[in-house]
Amino acid sequence: DVDSSAAATAIQAWKRQSRSATYGIRSHKSIREQRESLPVFAVRDQLLNIIKEHDMTVIVGETGSGKTTQITQYLAESGYGEKGIVACTQPRRVAAISVAKRVSEEVGCKLGDEVGYQIRFEDCTTTSTIIKYMTDGMLEREALVDPDMLKYSIIMLDEAHERTVATDVLFALLRDAVRRRKGSLKLIITSATLDSSKFSHYFDDCPVFHIEGRTFPVKIYYTKQPEKDYIEAAIDTVMDIHVSNPPGDILVFLTGREEIETCCETIVQKMSTLYKSDASVSELIVLPIYSAMPSEMQSRIFEPTPKGKRKVVIATNIAETSITIDGIYYVVDPGFVKVNAYDAKLGMDSLIVQPISKAQADQRSGRAGRTGPGICYRLYTKKAYEREMAANTVPEILRQNLSNTVLMLKAMGIEDVVHFGFMDRPKEQAILAALQELYILDALDSDGRLTRTGKYMSYFPMEPLMSKTMIQSVDFGCSYEVMVIIAMLSVPDVFYRPREQREKADKAKQQFDDYTGDHLTLLNVYEKWEDSEFSRTWCSDHYVHEKSMRKARDVKIQLGKIMGQLDRREGRRDSSIVSCKGDKEIIIKAFVSGYFKNCAKRVNNAGHYDEEGTFRTLVENTPVHIHPSSALFRKGGIDYVMYHTLILTNQEYMQCVTKIDARWLVKYAPRFYKQAAENELSLMKKREKIEPLWNRFDQGQEWRLSRGRR
Ligand code: ADP
Ligand code: MG
């Protein structure tokens, strides 16, 4: 539904601008020079020719060679934007935003006009958008409503080596779409490193184009002994470099926000002591970068370092290939990364810190050799690199829970998910487990076909447990409240807890605490904020992050829109957004109908309910604790609870916890729980639980969960 006249005007404007940007008619000289100095510029015409002649092209080029920011512009400049949108996917949200911003500057337009971005719950595009950066997850969702991708003339799947689940699914979906659209849709696969023959073969033996990068040698140092505390080691290394090495910025790789913030704080502290004792020490600018960071902060990492100073950027693996920072001469690599993986002990996906692969280590060290000869300090031994690290990172699809993916494929009408054209096919076990989970959630019937509930669930860009809760809440008559709580659960923590004012902050939070637990506490916070007319001072007075709250309001609005679409599709006259007007039990029941797997009960060693006992999860029987931030922390009289997630710090914690009545589990999850004889709940035996699913499935072939029976 692109407004064609608006698009035409935009294209005109685009042409004027891009020409002036390319030929320097306007005052974008420095940007023009910068653009023309990138390795990809030298092969611009060659590249455009290959793309013109083939429906699919694989492009491999060193990080920083200009793939992400330039190729989309070349395509728009040579007319692809007139036939549809030029899309470029990114595995990470921050990268999509940051790159879109940069390209809008290069083009000279407002972000969201000719150049825009779209990520989950945030659409920064207009009818005049010609170049669109988006997360791979967003494009995957678009395939649900438009499998032929008719909006687009060309799609670039960027960062293909990251092999996220969404990118892997898009590999197969887009290959089919390109084959169907015969010449009117083109596909480009871009990456820093990849097995090019494998990719070429998969994409119908398409050509592989190499962009020769300009790189300088990087000297690599290893530690003699394994490091006990890699953060401490990283901090020491940074300090050493700053004090004794020639100018040049430093890039440090850590695994996540908390580590990065701690590291920044410590370096700042150490530096302030150092400045006092030695006036000759030059200034060290400390800059963090991670995904949940405010975008104003993010742009600071690209600002050139003032003369006589040094910059240290402390980043997650986003700086490995997605974002290139110029001027880096030193890389500090502790060798770890946080990945989303299925944790058998918890029975769910969770973020775990694990060693990087050799390919990642090489990418990281490569960051030091873009501007001149550099140095990489690897905080692990040479032996560890050579003998312990895997050669390549395992594609996400081989290690993650696939329920969400399977649900989407089913909603796209792909019945035979086992034989879906994945580049690397997941294990049968993993697909069967996903089918089982979806069956239990009532998203699939016993023949493995999508149910109405499943279809509705697929409309929501959320994990199945959440979308199930959202759908059920309509029947429970509390969809308004559930929408608010889900929105609050989808944003970074709303409670602000500065180190110096913890007690005050905790007191402020207690005012919101609901006796049933954290789900309703979140609702309280939102409603009080709404009562204050979304006031900023209210937030600071109550130790609440305003930014998170505003984000939650946006998510709520987006969810409302999806509900509206659902109503229209179903021909419903009345909105399905309804309020239960304070009936707390109903809200919790709605959550139980989705989150019944995430429950724990308090038991003693013999496995019986015990007021003094510890919590154990009902599914895996893992010991878990109520997180200290919970409204239920240290509260008595609780036997069963439901939680939103588990997090592992020094022990397993349940986060966002609410008291439940065990009987609700049997009532709202009859495919999962039954009343045990001794009147205690027990899990149904696995066999009984899943048997019906495999009756007729996969083109007559019989599937059984247990291997022995296949
Ligand atoms: P590739 O995708 O091949 O890794 P990019 O197109 O991302 O390369 O980067 C090309 C150049 O653009 C790099 O030199 C990078 O530093 C620069 N660049 C990218 N984003 C920004 C930004 N937000 N601000 C300034 N420079 C940027
Ligand atoms: Mg890139």
Image (cartoon, grey):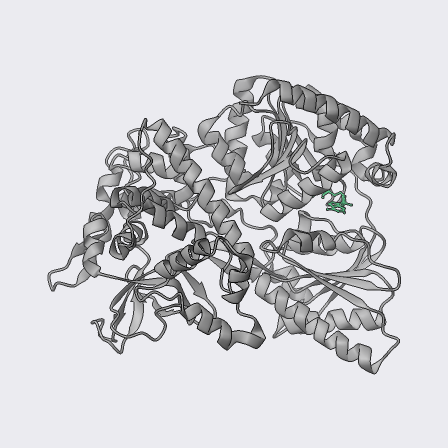
Q: Nearer the viewer, residue 511 or 332?
A: 511
Instruction: Determine if residue 543 is in view.
Output: yes
In the orientation shown, which residue stands out farthest toward the left? 677
The location of residue 706, given as percent across then percent down, is 28, 48
In the orientation shown, which residue stands out farthest toward the bottom? 277
The location of residue 661, given as percent across then percent down, is 22, 61
Task: Say whether residue 322 is left or right of residue 366.
Answer: left
Question: Does 315 appear above or below 150?
Answer: below
At x 40%, y 59%, the residue is: 522
Instruction: Determine if residue 433 is in view.
Output: no
Disc count in the image? 0
Q: Nearer the viewer, residue 526 or 687?
A: 526
Q: Nearer the viewer, residue 533 or 267?
A: 533
Question: Does 619 appear above or below 112?
Answer: below
Task: Say whether residue 200 is left or right of residue 372.
Answer: left
The location of residue 649, given as percent across then percent down, is 48, 69
Task: Say whether residue 86 is left or right of residue 504.
Answer: right
Q: Quadrant of ligand 1?
A: top right
Question: Does 49 appear above or below 471?
Answer: above
For the C terminus, the image quarter is: top left
Q: Nearer the viewer, residue 501 or 363?
A: 501
The location of residue 131, given as percent across then percent down, is 66, 31
Task: Say whether residue 443 is left or right of residue 508.
Answer: left
